[in-house]
Image (spheres, rainbow, N blue to C red):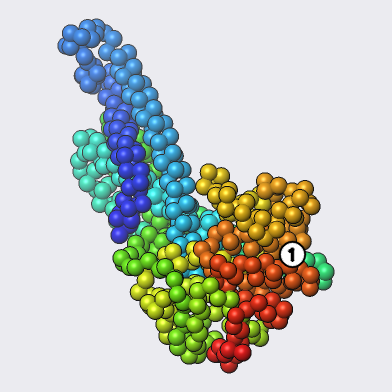
Amino acid sequence: MWLNFFLEISKIYKKRLIFLFFIMIFSVIFDVISIGSIFPLISFIVTENYDYLKFFDFSKNAFFKLDGKNIYLTAITIVFILFLTKNLFLLLFTKINSNFIAYLTIYYQEKILFKILKKNYYFFLEKNSSFFLREFSSEIKIITSGFVQPILDISLNILTLVGFLILLSFIDLNFTIISIILGFVFFLIFTLTLKKKFIFLGNQRRIQNLKIINYIKQLFEGIRELKIYKKENAFLLDLKKSWYRLANLAVKKNILTILPKLTFEIFLVFSILIFFYNVDNPQSLIPKLSILVLIMLRIIPNVNSLIKSLQKINYSEVALNNLINYFIKEEKKSLEIIKFEKKIELKNITFSYDNEKKIFDNLNIIIPKKSCIGIKGLNGSGKSTFVDLISGLLKPNSGEIFIDEKKYNDLDNTNWLSKFGYVQQKLFFFEESLKFNITLEKDIKKINHEKLNKIIKQIKLDEFLKQRRLTLDDILSESALNVSGGQAQRIGIARALYNSDGFLIFDEAFNNLDDNNINIITEIINELKINHTILIISHINNPLRICDEIYVLENKKIKKI
């Protein structure tokens, strides 16, 4: 499963990945040859027997024309060149590998964000905003740091181990077989026994990270009340507990990570000492023993790195399983596009959140195109839920929604939300230009300036710009402190008109406005009735006077007044 997932997420940079493996193989080849070339050199130094240097003797080749007396110098030169080449390949591999991981991280940050934003509205209702902050602050990077990079490290370590074991078999086959058996047993013991522990630690890390983000989020969102009541320290104790738990988890992870390395090194040193103790003439084995120790010192880090990489994957498994869900492809059906030319009908609608208390029970209403419908109701009667059902953000538990007498679920609803313009009580403003806050478009070339200017004049927003000496390029603050409540609503209406296609919803848009601004906004809406279907949700009666029909939500149903 992990290999398939690795190939799936890496295919975007397939050519770069293939080239990376190509460099990896050459790096391992030169690594093995460079270490192997030391054996004859050490043997010659210890025994002064020139037969060991035949490996470096190119004098028979006419191209080289080497003097036999200089074979020793030639051997030293070749060993240096091999090590230099090996390290140059390793440097190249590190650069390509780093670029591959960096670009892959950016790509999947964008892709997962896009996948999440395309989720249905109910998905966002089920999640706390701290969940999304955690996902994008740390979890997405786990795809590369906790999975792709460990897979690449495992590949490099396996290739290196195979290469050095082959070299070792030429020097001492029996020792190689014993090393493979003991190494495999050692590997299985540590990977299998510690796997569940690393998965548990990884899951606890996710939990504590979420708690920390949630505490910090609440701390700054509620800073006004906390300062008024002098309770700035309200969350500090909880934060401190989570910080300590996270620190303890990191300590346990680090100890478990280094444990295989320490155990393996102790076992190896003990084995070498036992070997020396049982050999009658250890001096005669110095050349072979030197290269064996050199190879083992090269293999040990690879075995440790291999185990560490698997531990990283285990530690990241919970986060990875969650991220994998974003890569599941949803089947798309070929359906008729919604046009909305006559009416919307909600028939026998029943709805509840999580199958708990019913919000609506057998609700029925018809909204003709280009009509103006008013909706009243007490707090908690389901006014906002009613809007979410009509717009398709939520789906009813039972009953049907019909668009021009066709079932909503039988139609291609991908363009349905684009028909709606939504103006709510508290508009969210981005710390961007006024132009962006209306069009929600970063690319200036995609902005329909003719449509934008027409809307600004239509809702008399141009008068506000002249009075305040503002332009469309001036920056608004997040809470729009530099505009009044009435003007903020006009900007909201401009945004709704620019980004919608004929259906406007005003959800308690008149709250916190004085009578003068209520009348101004109401008159603007009255002028928009000619070409738009309008839904006004308000507990204030004044705006409802322009409606063709008024309904009240009560007792889980909707009734015409």
For mark 1, what is the residue?
486
- Left or right, 426 with respect to 348, comes to right
Residue 59 lies, with reference to residue 520, above or below; the image says above
In this rendering, the count of numbered labels is: 1
Q: Residue at x 62, y 76 (%)?
A: 536
Residue 144 lies, with reference to residue 72, above or below; the image says below
Residue 292 in picture, x, y percent from top left: 30, 36
Give 138 or 295, whichever is nearer the viewer: 138
Quadrant in the picture for the N terminus: bottom left
- Left or right, 302 with respect to 116, comes to left
Residue furthest to the bottom: 555
- The local crowd at label 1, few if under 14, some if 14 to 19, many if 20 or more residues have their Cα within 10 Å, is some
Residue 319 in picture, x, y percent from top left: 45, 61
Residue 405 lies, with reference to residue 39, above or below; the image says below
Give 366 or 1, whichever is nearer the viewer: 366
Q: Residue at x 81, y 66 (%)?
A: 227
Q: Please indicate, yes or no, whether residue 492 appears anywhere in the rendered image.
A: yes
Residue furthest to the front: 530
Q: Residue at x 53, y 75 (%)?
A: 388
Residue 542 in picture, x, y percent from top left: 72, 78
What is the secondary structure assignment of the residue under circle 1? helix
Q: Residue at x 64, y 85 (%)?
A: 377
Q: Please indicate, yes or no, whether residue 424 appears anywhere in the rendered image.
A: no
Quadrant in the picture for the C terminus: bottom right
Give 351 or 181, whichever is nearer the viewer: 351
Residue 156 in picture, x, y percent from top left: 33, 42
Give 495 or 257, whichever is nearer the viewer: 495
Disc 1 residue type (three-letter): Gly
When asked about the image quadrant of residue 101, the answer is top left
